[in-house]
Amino acid sequence: MSYIIELIEQYGLLVVFFNVFIEQLGAPLPAYPTMLVAGALADSARYSPWMLLVIAVAAALLADYAWYWAGRRYGNRVMAALCRISLSPDSCVRQTESVYLRFGPASLLAAKFIPGFASVASALAGATGTRRGVFLLADGLGATLWAGSAILLGSLFSSTVADLLRVLEELGKWGVLLIATALALFVAAKWWERHRFMKSLCMARISVDELYRLRKEGGAPVVVDVRSPLAQQEGRIPGALTIPDHEIETFVHDMPADGEVVVYCSCPNEVSAARVAKLLMQRGYDRVRPLAGGIDAWVAAGYEIEQA
């Protein structure tokens, strides 16, 4: 354990840089505790708190700009990929985009304090055409607040942090094992949360071919598009209704409660569609199914779309 403390004291800047950079790219390796410890050890280390802050902000900006560039170049495909690999179901694009579209670049000031928000928000900033200078300014200020708070807390409670490190040092290899176990439990808890969330959305799907056949035969169900406004700009299934986030709970349509409803999105595993389908079923609509593969499967099959 003493080796780890010496490593932070001597190479704290590098440790913080890589931890922040990897976390902001999306890896479940929290950098806040590392910055807090590095801030507590700054007085006895080879770096100053100000240099530590500069390095942490630079690492965050570098990773965030990579997501910004990807969002600007590839648009919604980047958000879909983030939604697929995220361990936090709450970080799915629909929720994050509703916050970003409401508050704009100002939301980046608090993005890093919200688990799963920062990477998606950076990609959304690029996809929605936020100017580069505005993004870098807002993201830089947010990174400064985030990293600065950790370093300041570490400095203010340096004696407490030192006592904790001393206890871990006395534990030797058991201290290292304790830290590794805590990290493993954190990742496992996030994975289990996502697993339970996905399991709760298990329900029958309808294929794009079956939906197309029903529409051709004149028995077309009501089709509901639950994608974000940004995603809908790329086109939707002809005649599809849209449900904004704030209207999901109160959605009412002039049709029998036993009428068929098909809900689609562009999320992996039809997450958003299945979530809305569950809510509609709770509101009394008995025959609700998500569209398997969502809009991507509809387009891949060569079926018509209309511009929003």
Image (cartoon, rainbow, N blue to C red):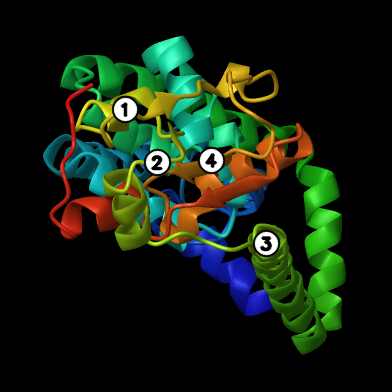
Front disc: 2 or 4: 2
Secondary structure found at label 4: strand
Mark 3 → mark 4, Cα distance in angstroms: 32 Å
Q: Is residue 126 above or below residue 32?
A: above
Is disc 1 surrounded by few (<14), some (14 to 19) or many (20+) residues within 10 Å? few
Is the N terminus in the top left, top right, bottom left or bottom right quadrant?
bottom right
Residue flagged by tag 2: what amino acid is it? Ala
Q: In terms of depth relative to the viewer, which is nearer, 148 or 107?
A: 107
Secondary structure found at label 1: loop
Sequence-earlier tag: 2 or 4:
2
Going 85% across and 78% down the picture, which residue do you hit?
170
Numbered tag placed on residue 239 in the rendering: 1
Is disc 3 surrounded by few (<14), some (14 to 19) or many (20+) residues within 10 Å? some
Mark 3 → mark 1, Cα distance in angstroms: 38 Å
At which x and y percent is residue 195?
66, 67
Mark 1 → mark 2, Cα distance in angstroms: 10 Å
Mark 2, residue position: 220
Numbered tag placed on residue 190 in the rendering: 3
At which x and y percent is residue 74?
16, 44
Residue flagged by tag 4: what amino acid is it? Val
Residue flagged by tag 1: what amino acid is it? Gly
Secondary structure found at label 2: loop
Q: Is residue 2 visible?
A: yes
Marks 1,2: beta carbons within 8 A: yes
Sequence-earlier tag: 3 or 1:
3
Going 24% across and 36% down the picture, which residue do you hit?
68
